[in-house]
Image: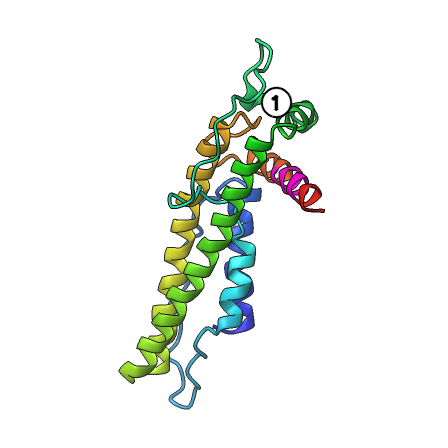
């Protein structure tokens, strides 16, 4: 995977969040046969995966089932009226500030964030194992490159599944705007609120 290929993949991931899905383009004309002297495409490297995972950095991941669950403390109850999922960013901030006063709430957010990082490490390890297996199989670099690209495409599907799980989990914690959605404007709003939550965790660690 050369630099242009990687940038195209990352751009498609960003567009999946920031813009509605566009109609599929018309099929491109069949390419001419490559010259026998053409060099095979390079196999995607570890740095490629680092870049891909940094772009795929999701809402913090699902809680680690092996971690002891912190003592449950009910979050502040919002006043009756507008659905929390419909709140704007500005309307959500006072609710986040109130939730952050509860240490148990921050413990849960921190557990989610830690599991997100663990998920990324698992993805890196899995891909590294695949790279080693492909090298040991002595198949051509062209086939190696295609198999790794298939893995990268599958990673996008796994990322979307993780994102939906995280949306439901944060909704259950009373975090405004969070629910299962793929609407680009709402995803961007959720991303901004995640940055606020991570800021609360950083302040607590200071």
- Figure disc tally: 1
Q: Residue 93 sits in which quadrant?
A: top right
Seen from the viewer's position, the closer of residues 67 and 19 is 67
Q: Is residue 129 above or below residue 106?
A: below
Residue at the image point whose x is 58% and y is 13% from the top: 82
Residue at the image point whose x is 46% and y is 60% from the top: 121
Which x, y percent locates residue 197?
63, 38
Tag 1's secondary structure? loop
Which x, y percent locates residue 80?
57, 9
Q: Residue 75 sits in which quadrant?
A: top right
**Prevailing secondary structure of the magenta residues:** helix
Residue at the image point whose x is 50% and y is 43% from the top: 111
- What color scheme is it? rainbow
Q: Residues within 10 Å of mark 1 (few under 14, many from 20)?
A: some
Taking the image as shown, residue 195 lies to the left or right of residue 57, namely right
Outermost residue to the bottom: 37
Q: Is residue 73 above or below residue 132?
A: above
Seen from the viewer's position, the closer of residues 64 and 27 is 64
Seen from the viewer's position, the closer of residues 159 and 108 is 108
| Magenta-highlighted residues | 194-201
Q: Is residue 203 above or below residue 117?
A: above
Which x, y percent locates residue 92?
65, 25
Residue at the image point whose x is 49% and y is 66% from the top: 49
Circle 1 sits on which residue?
A: 87
Outermost residue to the left: 137
Instruction: Evaluate whether residue 38 shows in this view.
Output: yes
Which x, y percent locates residue 43?
43, 77
Instruction: Evaluate whether residue 27 shows in this view.
Output: no
Outermost residue to the top: 80
Q: Is residue 38 above or below residue 55?
A: below
Magenta-span inclusion, residue 55? no
């Amino acid at each position: 995977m050369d630099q242009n290929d990687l940038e195209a993949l990352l751009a498609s991931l960003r567009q999946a969040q920031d813009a509605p899905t566009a109609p599929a383009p018309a099929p491109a004309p069949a390419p001419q046969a490559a010259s026998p002297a053409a060099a095979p495409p390079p196999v995607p490297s570890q740095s490629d995966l680092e870049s891909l995972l940094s772009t795929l950095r999701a809402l913090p991941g699902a809680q680690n089932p092996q971690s002891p669950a912190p003592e449950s403390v009910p979050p502040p109850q919002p006043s009756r009226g507008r659905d929390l999922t419909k709140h704007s960013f500005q309307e959500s901030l006072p609710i986040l500030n109130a939730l952050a006063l509860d240490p148990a709430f921050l413990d849960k957010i921190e557990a989610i964030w830690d599991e997100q990082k663990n998920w990324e490490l698992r993805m890196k390890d899995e891909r590294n194992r695949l790279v080693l297996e492909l090298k040991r199989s002595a198949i051509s670099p062209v086939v190696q490159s295609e198999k790794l690209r298939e893995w990268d495409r599958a990673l996008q599907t796994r990322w979307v599944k993780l994102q939906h799980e995280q949306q439901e989990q944060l909704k259950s914690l009373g975090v405004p705007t969070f629910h299962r959605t793929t609407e680009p404007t709402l995803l961007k709003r959720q991303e901004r609120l995640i940055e606020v939550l991570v800021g609360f965790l950083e302040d607590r660690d200071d």
